[in-house]
Structure formats: structure tokens, C-alpha cells
Amino acid sequence: MASTIRWFQSFKQRLAAASRLFAVAMTMSTLGLLGQAHAQETITIGIGTQSTTTNTVTGGVVIQQLKLLEKHLPRTGRYANVNYKIDWQNFTSGPPVTNGMVANNLQIGMMGDFPLVVNGATFQAGKDPVRTQLIATLAYNINGSGNGLVVHRDSPYFELADLKGKRVSVPFGSAAHGMLLRAMRDRGWKEDFWELSSQSPEIGATSIQEKRVDGHANFVPFAELMPYRGFARKIFDGVETRFPTMHGVIVRTDFAEKYPEVVVAYLKAVLEANEWVRRNPVLAAQRIEEWTKVEKEVAYMFLGPSGLHTLDPTLKPKVLTALTAAHETLVAQGRLKEFNLEQFVNDRYLRQAFKEMGMDYDKQQASFANTEIAGKDPLCGLPIKDPRMGGEVWLEGGALTAYSSTLCTLAAIREAEAKKQEVGVAFVFDRSFGLKLFASAAFYSVVAKNPKQPEIVPFLLRRDAEQHAAKNGGKLVSYKEALSVATLK
């Protein structure tokens, strides 16, 4: 009996030990299985940005700096254990973004209308079934402003035709290059009209400063940035082509089809970035300067109220004619053949983003409204009824104030100077095209039928100011001269 008891006790001890070993083994096994089952998938999102191209910032640097993509990325269901690797890659123009997408180093990219067409056509012509698709607009100007051509501030040239036989540079393959090609085609000029060379924005700016070229064409914001920095003068704006211009977002189809929720999350981040800029235009301009080194005054000129570009991601048929026109121009120049726009455009992901954000896509798609300067003119005491007849004054380190007319805007500058307040920048609006201008860079027609309150009319182009003055019995004057007669008596 005693031996039986000893055996039973020994058995219990062995059983307990075995149970402990089994439990350890099961724990190790379970951990191993869980490790396999929950092994994190890493989704790399390569995004090709153009941070210094101001109207792409809400698709790139704003999202990056405010971490809006991280906020919207899916983290439930199939994405519950995903590890995201966001690879932001910055470029100065569109063609390198296309190269990165071809190599599959980039899955999402952004660029202007001409590079967009080249990108889409490149993938459509490839043997690989992968394509790219345009999934959103970033910003647009319905009349074509954004691209432009500048000369040195002391240049004797004031017209595009003045550059016949001269040295002109432009980033080849860019939206600005497309603008030049379209302008040449519209005028019937041959390719040897000028001596055309390819230069990046940075090199082109140096070439203008050092007078190594006679003219340099570039995309947003450089045709405004160079004049703002004081060494250039714009003599041609893309608005003269009368075709819309745009920048948009493209995605590789293999990535979008595998991770549609990620693409929707990115577009939700774009929507939030747009709203942040619209809600805080001055703060946004200041932050954009910090992040990109593009001066806040230039950033505000494009993206602020009554700015040169409209932030709107919807894919509007009228805006998409920019791509049709770009394709036609490239074909006419023998630079491109086939391109199927219908296969290229896909708003499915954007519609879903709108739905998840509680927004009405169709209503937004039908609208061409931009935010506009508004309020009551504090100097003249008048409401701002027509924003494009008014102006703005931004005091250095101080407030930005809107005014009801060019006269009141210039009078406000004089008043600030009399108070020893430094004016950082002032804006007026071109009477021919409605474009926002730096007041100091505009040409003015002054009609003094009423000497106590002269009519002061700003223009981008000297010829337009001359024509207005001749037609109305006025006089072509400089900014300083316009300022000197801007009195409220």
C-alpha cells in the first residue's frame, strides 16, 4: 500500500511536470503561430512631390508636415496589423516623378498638365499592364494663369514677339514648356523662332539674374517669385493662351487596386489640407514659406483669397480640357502620339473620399468658385462688392487688410508709410484678366477726369495699360507715379 501511494505521488509529480512542459510548449507554439499570423505587412507609399511648386503643396508638404496621411490611413480589418512606410520624395518638376513611377519607386505623384499627359501616355504605351490614372486635381486656373515668361527687370523686351532669335530657356517637359509650345503654335511660329534651351527653375533664375538668357519660362510660382525677388519682370502669362492649366495627382493602378483604402485615405488628407489653407490663408502662407522657402507673399498670391489658383480636387470636364489641349499640342509638335484620356481619368477614389468626409462631390464638381477677398474697406468705408476691382495691403509683421478699389489700396499704402509702417507687400488686380498682381510690379493707366479722385487702373502688361490710357484720355504711369496721385481728397 505504501508503495502504491509513493507511486501515485510520483505519478502526480511527473504529470504536473509534464503539464508544465506542455503548457510551456503550447505557449511557445501559440506565440509562434501568432507571430506568423500577425506578422506585420509593410505597405510602402512612395509619394513624388514638388514642394516648391506652390499649387501642389496641399498634395505634398502640407500633408507631410501636418501628418494628415497618418491620420487617415486605415488601421482596421485587413489593415489591422499593417506597418506603413511613407516615403516622401521631392522633385523640382514632373518628368522625374514619372521616372520614379515607371521604376515603381513612387506609387503616387503630382505634376502639371503637360507632364500628366506624358506620364499617362508613357504607361499606356508600355508592355506592362500597369497604368497610371489621374485621381484628383490639386489646383487650377480656368483661364491658364500659373505658367509665365520673365525677362530681366532692365530688359528692353515687353512682348513675347520681342524675343525672336533670342535666348530663351524653360524646363523641358514641364507645363511651362507646354505653354511655350502652345503659344508658338497659336502664332504660327516655327521651332527656330528663338534659341530654346532646357534649364531647371534654379538655373533659369540664375541665368536671368546674370543675363545669360534673354527670357526664361517657368511654372508656378517662379514667374511670380522671380519678380518678387526683384530681378525679373513678367512679360507673358499663360492666361493669354486662354486654356485652363492644372496640377493633378496620379497613382499606379497596381497600387490603387491592391490598396484602394490607402488611396482614399490620401485623398481625404488632400481634402483636409485644402480646408486648412482656405481657413487660415495667412498662417498657411507663413508655414509654406518655412517648409519650402517660397516667400509667404508668393504663396499667398496663389492660394489666398482671390488667388491665382483655385484649390479644388474634383475632376471637372472643363478643367480637363487642359489635358486635351496639351495632347493636341504635343502631337502637333511631333512629341507624342497616342493617349486615351478616358482611360486615364478615374474619380472613383475621390468620390469615396468625399463620401467618407460627408461632402457632396457632384456639387463641388459643378462649382468654379474660389475664395475671394471680402468685408468692408476700413479706409474708404465701402463694402468690397467686386473683389477683382479691389486690393490688399500686408504690413510687415502685421495685419493683411482688403480694400474696395485700386485707389483705396494705394491710398492705404501712402497712409501706412506716413505712419512709418513698413508695407511688406500689396496686391492689386489686372483689369484685362482679373489676375492678382504685386502692386509694385504692375503698369498703371491713370485717368484724371476728376483730379480729386483719379481712376487708377492696374495691368500686368504694359501694352494693355497703354491702350487703356490712349482710349480713355489717360496716361501710362509707373507704380511710384500711381502711388503719388492716390489721394482721397
Image (cartoon, grey):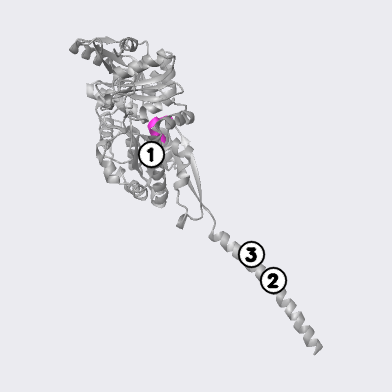
Q: Is residue 234 left or right of residue 68?
A: left
Q: Which mark is residue 151?
A: none
Q: Residue at x 40, y 30 (%)?
A: 54
Q: Which residue is mark 1?
A: 275
Q: Amino acid at mark 1?
A: Glu
Per the model, the C-alpha gap separating discs 1 and 3 is 51 Å
Mark 2 sits on what residue? 20
Q: Which mark is residue 28?
A: 3
Looking at the rendered image, the quarter that the N terminus falls into is bottom right
Q: Kindly identify the amino acid type of the residue bearing the numbered disc 2.
A: Arg
Residue drawn at point x = 57 percent, y = 63 percent: 33
Camera-nearest label, 1 or 3:
1
Mark 2 or mark 3, which has the lower sequence index?
2
Q: Quadrant of residue 335?
A: top left
Q: Position of residue 482 (x, y in %)?
A: 31, 12
Question: Would residue 422 be visible to someone looking at this image?
Answer: yes
Nearer to us of marks 2 and 3 is 2
Residue 403, above or below 97: above
Badge 1 or badge 3: first in the primary sequence: 3
> Which residue: 46% across, 56% down?
76
> Which quadrant holds the C terminus?
top left
- Residues rendered magenta in the picture: 52-57
